Amino acid sequence: MTATRERAEALDHAGARVVPLLRVTDLSVSYARPRKGTNLGTGAALTDASLQVRPGEIVGIIGETGSGKTTLARATVGLVRPRSGRIEFDGQDMGALKGRALRDFRRSGQVQLVFQDPLRSLDPDLTVAELVREPLDIAGTLSRAERDERVAESLRLVGLEPESMLRRRPRQLSGGQRQRVSLARAISTRPQLLFCDEPVSALDVSNRNLVLSLLDRLRRELDLAVVIIAHDLSSLAGIADRVAVFYRSRVVEQGPIQDVLERPAHPYTGLLTAFAPSVTHVDRLRPDQLRPPAGARVWTSPEACVFANRCRFAHDACATQPRPVALADEREAACHVAGEWRAQITETQES
Ligand SMILES: Nc1ncnc2c1ncn2[C@@H]1O[C@H](COP(=O)(O)OP(=O)(O)OP(=O)(O)O)[C@@H](O)[C@H]1O
């Protein structure tokens, strides 16, 4: 039985798909030479990260700069080799793909990346027609006429009129149009999974909302799973089904987005929601309730929890990095006080 068939047959009684399209387990990635200015001296870009993405689902990845978000996307498409851990895509162990098999997988365009800055990622010398057709030329599975048809169809799917777009070059497009061309290019191979790295950070507010609702429409129309990498929670709040929170190379919390926003289990997520009050209306937190007081203990051991120095609730147990633990269905957090710190805030308020 093919992996796709297995996936299709693994439906529960309610019709929900239970087998993930992407399953990342305990993934660690180190770059040979840390980048200049990096805050991670060891070069560890990702440490024991686990994450799943189901078909047709939108998963948000949030975290500050350098926390490993892009590295996860690059490892999934085979652009960087993990140090340890496992990546399975559509039932296939990606680590087992070597040489030609890996090249063929990448050429097939089943997983596509959309980069943050379309002006830099789109070749300025190519026309829109050439840009959108390029992944199809690389995949090499369609005839010339079918490719032309697919290019036009992909442009229409992202809300661009092919007739007026095909001959333009990136500099002749607005920022929003360039982002749509990047998306049309990425979906031209009809991928099963799309990684969008900061897809809206370079856009103004109205274009942001348009591109986000476009991603939502594409996932429904193409049954596409989408991973949206973002710096700010607000761009994920109305669109993602689930969210994974990264902090210094680790996944510190994940779960259904509404749940995570309303009841963050990790103090770092709490801090993120405190800085984005518009995304949660339940039990709103303030940054000062979460920050360590002046003179708080300084954690210097590399074994300590990565968040300890910014955490008001750090205590002796935090001398070791916690493993993620399941809190509820689909909900987990890597924090020694995951279930307790909120009560500490309430007690302080009441006393
Ligand atoms: N090619 C590379 N060579 C060396 N170090 C790298 C390389 N790419 C990323 N890093 C380092 O790996 C860590 C994780 O980087 P990554 O780009 O995955 O973070 P990110 O969360 O996507 O950041 P941003 O939000 O700024 O894009 C950082 O410390 C970064 O400096």
Image: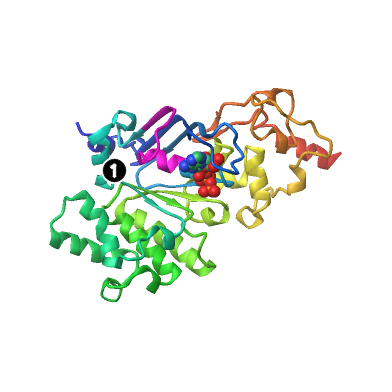
Instruction: Check the picture and name the quadrant holding the N terminus.
Output: top left
Quadrant of the image occupied by residue 302? top right
Q: Amino acid at mark 1?
A: Arg
Q: Identify the residue position indicated by label 1 in the image.
A: 106
In this image, 184 relative to 242: left or right? left
Q: Give percent across and percent down for residue 342.
A: 71, 38
Within 8 Å: ligand 1 and the Cβ of disc 1? no
Q: Is residue 284 magenta?
A: no
Residue 272 visible in the picture: yes
Quadrant of the image occupied by residue 25? top left
Near-viewer residue (229 or 122): 122
- Magenta range is 71-87
Q: Residue at (49%, 64%) from the top-left corner?
A: 209
What is the image's colouring?
rainbow
Q: Residues within 10 Å of mark 1 (few under 14, many from 20)?
A: some
Near-viewer residue (214 or 19): 214
Q: Is residue 75 magenta?
A: yes
In this image, 129 relative to 272: left or right? left
Q: Give percent across and percent down for residue 171.
A: 40, 71
Quadrant of the image occupied by residue 160? bottom left
Residue 245 visible in the picture: no
In this image, 317 relative to 224: left or right? right
Q: Residue at (29%, 76%) from the top-left corner?
A: 164
* Vertical comparison of 235 with 203: above or below: above
